[in-house]
Image (cartoon, coloured by chain):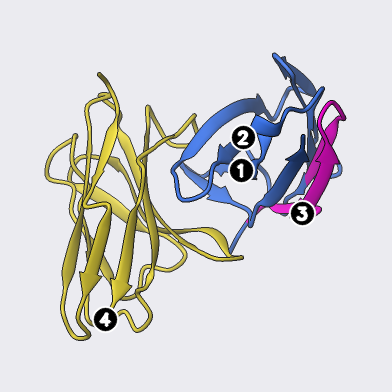
Amino acid sequence: SQQGEEDPQALSIQEGENATMNCSYKTSINNLQWYRQNSGRGLVHLILIRSNEREKHSGRLRVTLDTSKKSSSLLITASRAADTASYFCATGANSKLTFGKGITLSVRP
Amino acid sequence: DGGITQSPKYLFRKEGQNVTLSCEQNLNHDAMYWYRQDPGQGLRLIYYSQIVNDFQKGDIAEGYSVSREKKESFPLTVTSAQKNPTAFYLCASSTEGNTEAFFGQGTRLTVV
């Protein structure tokens, strides 16, 4: 079963706008991670947030984690056309990573 | 260059044949994973291994087999028992379970 469920499934924004993506999960986790995938390629790790952390930043990325609601959000600020990709959340628990179905982000120039 | 390499990039299989997908890493990672990706399905875990000579079934292990005889290598065999093998297969590794995973570029398997 897939642990994470991303929302929305697809997002289209204008370059320069912020993009917010959400992820909900069902069971206890050690950490939550976000990955990016360009079409037909492997995934690239973006950021990891541990279960005892509430917010983390990396460059234009900001991720939050609410373990009481079992949810996380990824914010990409000042989006660029090059941010166009699929984004996945993954939950780390029981020595494995479980991925959601992903969000397709399109950034229009 | 350190990294994780999958081969081949494209693979065609006739119905009833077994095929083996290669995954090699030189990152000195203990954990390795195989995922299957279908359109609209995200990534589904097939098998994972935390240490040499040990591996566990993931969510969709039926019709697949793996081995972990060396730390660097985690080959996946798609057997004839897998009824719908056409998909994009991704291998990943990490220092240990749960941590940041590094992915290969994938193998696209097509049944002809």
Q: Residue B84 placed where, x, y %?
A: 38, 80
Label 1 SS: strand
Name the outermost residue toward the left.
Answer: B69
Foreground of the two, A50 or B25: B25
Q: Is residue A33 left or right of residue A62?
A: left
Q: CA distance from mark 1 to mark 4?
A: 35 Å
Tell whether A54 sits left or right of A59. Answer: right
Chain label for disc 3: A
* Residue B78 seen: no
Front label number (1 vs 2): 2
Given contact means CB atoms under 8 Å apart, are the residues at marks 1 and 2 in contact?
yes
Residue ranking furthest to the front: A109
Residue B42, by quadrant, is: bottom right
> Nearer the observer, disc 3 or disc 2?
3
Instruction: Say which colour chain B has.
Output: yellow
Q: Which residue type carries mark 1?
A: Thr
Residue under pointer 1:
A91
Q: Which mark is residue B112?
A: 4
- The magenta-colored residue range is A3-22
Of residues A106 and B61, the one nearer the viewer is A106
- Work out whether disc 1 and disc 2 sit on a shared chain: yes
Considering depth in this image, is B22 or B33 the residue closer to the camera? B22
Question: CB atoms at circles 1 and 4 under 8 Å apart?
Answer: no
Q: Is A11 inside the magenta-drawn segment?
A: yes
Above or below, A40 against A37 in this view is below
Residue at the location (37% across, 73% down)?
A: B86
The subunit letter for the residue under badge 4 reads B
Task: Kindly identify the amino acid type of the residue bearing the numbered disc 2.
Answer: Gln
Q: Secondary structure at mark 3?
A: strand
- B89 in magenta: no
